[in-house]
């Protein structure tokens, strides 16, 4: 049985219609197997026309980041050279973590069109309907364990740049949210396995509300304002193009951090953030602290100027006060 990538290549090589019989012969499969392949391609988002007496014609490309399309356009050296794509999965993060111990997993990406149990930080839920970009990448970083918490800054910066390149004013909010006009469009999650001196692996999860109805997500959430790229643009975007640009930006920033450290990344991150100098409320579990966000420290923590002096916050959620 040909793989979807091989079968789509057969259809593509025909400018007009190709009969089911000719397709079956070229692919070395039965006519009914051809029909199954056509059905599968339609599920992957391709438009395949069928006409009685003429056969099949490829009339529209997919916008999904399926591996056989990504491989043709992606200009990375290692990130995304191995891709697992699923229409639906519990969580790309869980699948990626289960693969991470394999010796050849560095750079592998797991992408899904929909997640049933998407995860946020601290066991929070991440709503992941069809239309979004739900992606996890496995990395085996050559960097000290203490620096690993900076990886989400690399990822959120890459997401922010990718969204800005399509003309939207994406901004970063500590620790790793990507926002448009104060509404969350993307979030980052990090899972690691590390010893004191050595990182076994890091899995970075990236969720981007690409072509989703943000009102439908908001209906289930009360503490965060939500938006999506399609709601901001008033049209859908190609998730294939979005993921391609994202993986390219992520690899570039990751290599920069591995080779030169995180200072330049944090500088760039700060330039894309609107929170420094602003009054913020930090919520950590049930505790809240108020102050002015004055700096992102070299370890990624947030320096907060409070009435009682400066404190460094390592984790929590920020609300900007106006
Ligand atoms: C995050 O957590 O922002 C990290 C989200 C990471 C999701 C990706 S998708 C691919 C990979 N596979 C996974 O299973 N996860 C990763 P946090 O900062 O804890 O934010 C979670 C909070 O955001 C929730 O409690 C909700 O309030 C809100 N939220 C949930 N779904 C959302 C969505 N689709 N868009 C915006 N906000 C959402």
Image: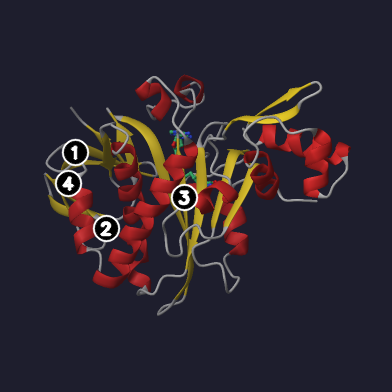
Q: Position of residue 175 (x, y in %)?
A: 31, 48
Q: Nearer the viewer, residue 301 or 16?
A: 16
Identity of the residue drawn at 77% across and 25% down:
54
Residue wearing tag 1: 274
Residue wearing tag 4: 271
Distance in Å between CA atoms under marks 1 and 3 = 33 Å
Q: Are marks 4 and 2 in contact (CB under 8 Å)?
A: no
Residue wearing tag 3: 73
Distance in Å between CA atoms under marks 3 and 4 = 29 Å
Residue wearing tag 2: 300
Mark 2 beta carbon near ligand 1 (under 8 Å)? no
Does label 1 or label 3 sit earlier along the sequence? 3
Q: Secondary structure at mark 2?
A: loop
Hey, which quadrant is residue 256 in on the image?
A: bottom left
Distance in Å between CA atoms under marks 1 and 2 = 16 Å
| Residue sticking out furthest to the bottom | 197
Does label 4 or label 2 sit earlier along the sequence? 4
């Amino acid at each position: 049985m040909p793989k979807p990538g091989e079968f789509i290549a057969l259809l593509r090589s025909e400018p007009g219609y190709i009969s089911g019989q000719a397709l079956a012969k070229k692919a070395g499969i039965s006519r009914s197997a051809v029909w199954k392949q056509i059905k599968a391609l339609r599920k992957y988002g391709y438009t395949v026309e069928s006409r009685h007496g003429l056969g099949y014609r490829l009339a529209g490309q997919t916008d999904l980041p399926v591996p056989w399309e990504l491989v043709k356009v992606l200009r990375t050296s290692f990130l995304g050279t191995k891709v697992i794509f699923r229409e639906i999965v519990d969580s790309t993060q869980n699948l990626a973590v289960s693969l991470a111990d394999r010796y050849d997993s560095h750079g592998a990406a797991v992408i899904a069109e929909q997640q049933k149990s998407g995860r946020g930080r601290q066991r929070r839920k991440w709503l992941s309907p069809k239309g979004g970009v739900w992606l996890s990448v496995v990395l085996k970083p050559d960097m000290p364990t203490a620096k690993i918490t900076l990886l989400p800054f690399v990822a959120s910066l890459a997401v922010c740049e990718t969204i800005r390149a399509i003309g939207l004013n994406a901004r970063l909010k500590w620790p790793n949210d990507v926002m448009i006009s104060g509404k969350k469009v993307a979030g980052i999650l990090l899972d690691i396995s590390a010893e004191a001196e050595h990182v076994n692996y890091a899995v970075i999860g990236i969720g981007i509300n690409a072509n989703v109805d943000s009102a439908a997500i908001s209906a289930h959430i009360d503490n965060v304002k939500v938006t999506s790229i399609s709601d901001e643009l008033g049209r859908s975007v190609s998730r294939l193009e979005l993921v391609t640009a994202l993986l390219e930006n992520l690899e570039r920033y990751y290599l920069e951090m591995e080779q030169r450290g995180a200072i330049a990344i944090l500088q760039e991150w700060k330039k894309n953030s609107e929170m420094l100098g602003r009054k913020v409320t930090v919520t950590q579990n049930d505790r809240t602290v108020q102050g002015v966000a004055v700096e992102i420290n070299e370890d990624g923590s947030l320096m907060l100027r409070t009435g009682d002096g400066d404190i460094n916050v390592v984790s929590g959620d920020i609300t900007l006060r106006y």
